[in-house]
Amino acid sequence: MDKYLIIDGSSILFRAFYALPPMSTKTGKSTNAVLGFLNILLKALELIEPTGVGVCFDLSGPTFRSDIYVDYKANRSLAPEELSEQFGYIKEILTAFKVNYYELPGYEADDIAGTLAKELSNAENEVYLLTGDKDYLQLVNESTKLLYTKTGISELGIYDVETIYSEMGITPKQIVDLKALMGDKSDNIPGIPGVGEKTALKLIQEFGSIENLYENIGNLKINKTNQKIIDNKDIAFISKELSKIDTDVSLDFKISDLKLVKYDDILLGEILNKYELNSIMKRLEVQDESTLLEEVSKKNIKNNEPIEEIVNTVKENGYFAFKFLTSNKPYLGGKIFKVGLLCNNTYFINDIEDGNIEFLNDLFKDEKIVKIGYEIKEDILHIISQNMELKNYLGDVVIAEYLLNPTDSDYSMDRIAAKYGITLEANFPDKKALKDNSEHWENKVQDDYLLSILELIDEVHNLQLSKLEDYDMLKLYNEIELPLVYVLADMEYTGVQVDKDALIEIGKNLELELEGLVENIYIQAGVEFNINSTKQLAEILFEKLKLPVIKKTKTGYSTDIEVLEKLEDKHEIISYLIRYRTISKLKNTYVNGMMVYINEMTGGRIHSNFNQTVAATGRLSSQDPNLQNIPVRTEEGRQLRKIFTKTNENNKLIDADYSQIELRLLADISEDANMIESFINKEDIHTTTAAKVFDVSMNEVTPLLRSRAKAVNFGIVYGISDYGLSQDLNISRNEAKSYIENYLNRFSGVGKYMDEIVKQAKKDGFVETKFGRKRFLPELSSRNRNIRNFGERIALNMPIQGTAADIIKIAMVNVYFKLKESGYKSKLILQIHDELIVEAFIDEMEEVKKILVEEMENAVKLKVPLTVDIDIGDSWYETK
């Protein structure tokens, strides 16, 4: 008996699109629906093992049903562009897969599928209809079954005649009668008003069909629902006609066309690679000859070997993958409880009772042996804590993946494995869950989990290196990102001293001010209320005090800061509210929030976690706590810097801050003569800009003009619009527009850069920094104007902001290792935007200052000088 699989391609593609999260290639092609479709197809092929396959698609435009009922499917909105574009992609893949697809003007996919099923349906064939549409139930018979997607697209259920009857109490042929009564909202089939599935099923079970129902209509009891059935006979028969699948479509079709034949491995591989469907390539065991993508196959991993054996294997091969499982970070009292190494298909996994890994020291410090890890900074923290050193660590699969896909938010083990088509030994909860609950995990679970990580490291890294080479990012990876890992680990482990008493005092002062603000707000409102309740505050402002409504949301009146600022001159209460919010955020977010991170185990230090795989521009971020976000625009915010102090009287904090690095980079990249001249002559760039934009001499530039020029300078870097600038400066859009036009006329190199970088980005699909870091821009190919505009702003800004990020990273690496090589005890402890902060011993201070200036100012050679401002103090506050 031959088996045939007929697929409703439109239905499956729709199901997959809404079941899977958005995915796109680096060039902006959406692929989530295609991936889901192919996964379902391969699952069905494994389940059914068919002789032949055919796929049916809807075509846009009216069908014969629109002639029967003009409002048929009139409620359907257009498919999102991210979905509609994928129909072409899947058809291209099906052609390479040598699977025929069918579509016909005036007919829907189910009509074509029904016709194919009827042609194939006989005693010698078994037909399976794969769909997410239950309309197909009417086609089920003794030789035709329905393969239905359930739970999104993760499961497939099979319906035959018996299943339908046991679940619904009717036969497949009666499905159209059921829909004639109950209608179908998704297709805008009207049905009888007020008749739902339960009532419709009862009637069809009793009368068999709507024809028989209306022949015996007099037997119905007169009630509200039955009266509607009586009154809407015509609608019922129209609905039945609309629900009926046409199985007699005139189709150019031969059964032999459906036969599965061998596809061209290379051709299919090239197309799948174009859409970056690596997991499908792995499942089909195809590869793209043009890129020579290495086929990844499961390795035959040998059993757990004694440490002596793995050491010998490592020394013979010159590399190993490694990972620790730990109970927590070392400065929080955490210890290593299990260690794993993998080399040349041989692994070593062992429990560590006291957390001591001294027995691995020879391997770690051997510079001839390459080490590769997964989130290697977490492992380096524990190595540093044991006064050991990791030398010649060549790779981290998370950092490599970040460089290749900088806009991803998930670099988890499972996600990376799926991208490269690797099936891991085990699929357990994420590493954090394993750490936090380690005492609850069985030993074998931990071993399997650790082995999976080791396999991932071992199998993926070479593939990543190949891709990094293709994208010309190997130097960025090897010379900037990897050395930086050690710097960040040491900074986190060292931490920064905090004056807890000063923080408590700041909290008390803020609390006192809050109490006074609350009292004044109540006086102005004439009533006490919950100031933190948007609803209650809105009632006070717009109903009791009758202030003008600026903006509404779905839930009521908006009271956000933008609204409050526009109301500031309308009532005295507003200035108190703005101040209240400022002080409240300082106290709750920064004072109370900072307090929980003071580590008494390390003498009252804070150990912020610096992340290098978060920002798509390459900028570093920090968390637990976020030190990058401490406010600096208000004096109260700046006061918070007082709590970050030197450790003792033998030390000072040295703050080294790049001066206007992004504007210097704009001058360099745009090659604008006026900007370059201003920086070379050591002029104040904002004064220079003001003089040229407002057509006055340098001596005539007032503080107001300089302030406005500064807004223009930094706004241009971020692709600001005339509307955005008008809001920032509180001026008219026309005035803002004239500022921007004057700027681009006077700094013509900048205007030329802005035009050319966007054009080049559209051509290449990405922009890059001076060091090769890339930001892929699928946004530029969007049909949505807002998304395209967003992509253009990224294209303008990323080369500048990203290059600034690269430069500060280079400086960090050079400063850190220069201090270390020179034997100084002074330590790099913080990086905040364009600042580096070193805690220096007083007797080393002059040399440390020289190192900071020399390494930061010479991190890269530009057409304009990089300059660094140095400040010294007992606290971070004093250095600024």
Image (cartoon, grey):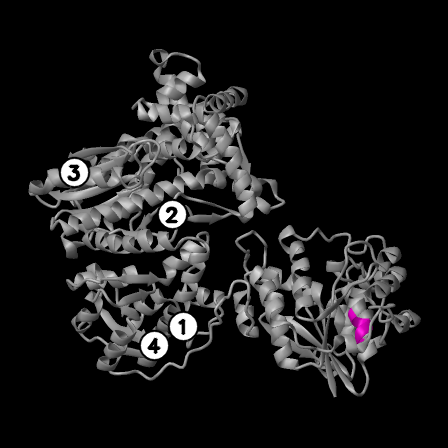
Q: Quadrant of the N terminus?
A: bottom right
- Camera sees residue 649: no
Of the two numbered discs 4 and 1 on the same chain, state the one appearing first in sequence.
Answer: 4
Q: Quadrant of the C terminus?
A: top left
Observer-side mark, 3 or 4, equals 4
SS for tag 4?
Answer: loop
Contact (CB < 8 A) between labels 1 and 2? no
Residue picked out by circle 1: 428
Q: Distance from label 2 to label 3 (Cα)?
A: 26 Å
533 in magenta:
no
Observer-side mark, 1 or 3, equals 3
Q: Distance from label 3 to label 4 (Cα)?
A: 47 Å
Q: Which mark is residue 344?
A: 4
Q: How many marks?
A: 4
- Camera sees residue 182: yes
Of the two numbered discs 1 and 3 on the same chain, state the one appearing first in sequence.
Answer: 1
Q: Position of residue 8 (x, y in %)?
A: 72, 68
Residue picked out by circle 2: 618
Give the main secondary structure of the magenta stretch: helix
Q: Position of residue 616 (x, y in %)?
A: 42, 48
Q: Position of residue 863 (x, y in %)?
A: 35, 32
Q: Residue drawn 44% across and 21% down?
A: 569
The residue nearer to you, when weighing 712 against 567, is 712
Residue picked out by circle 3: 849
Q: Distance from label 1 to label 2 (Cα)?
A: 30 Å
SS for tag 2?
Answer: loop
Disc 4 residue type? Asn
Contact (CB < 8 A) between labels 3 and 4? no
* Mark 4 Cα shell of 10 Å, populated few (<14), some (14-19), many (≥20): some
The residue nearer to you, when weighing 172 against 426, is 426
Disc 2 residue type? Gly
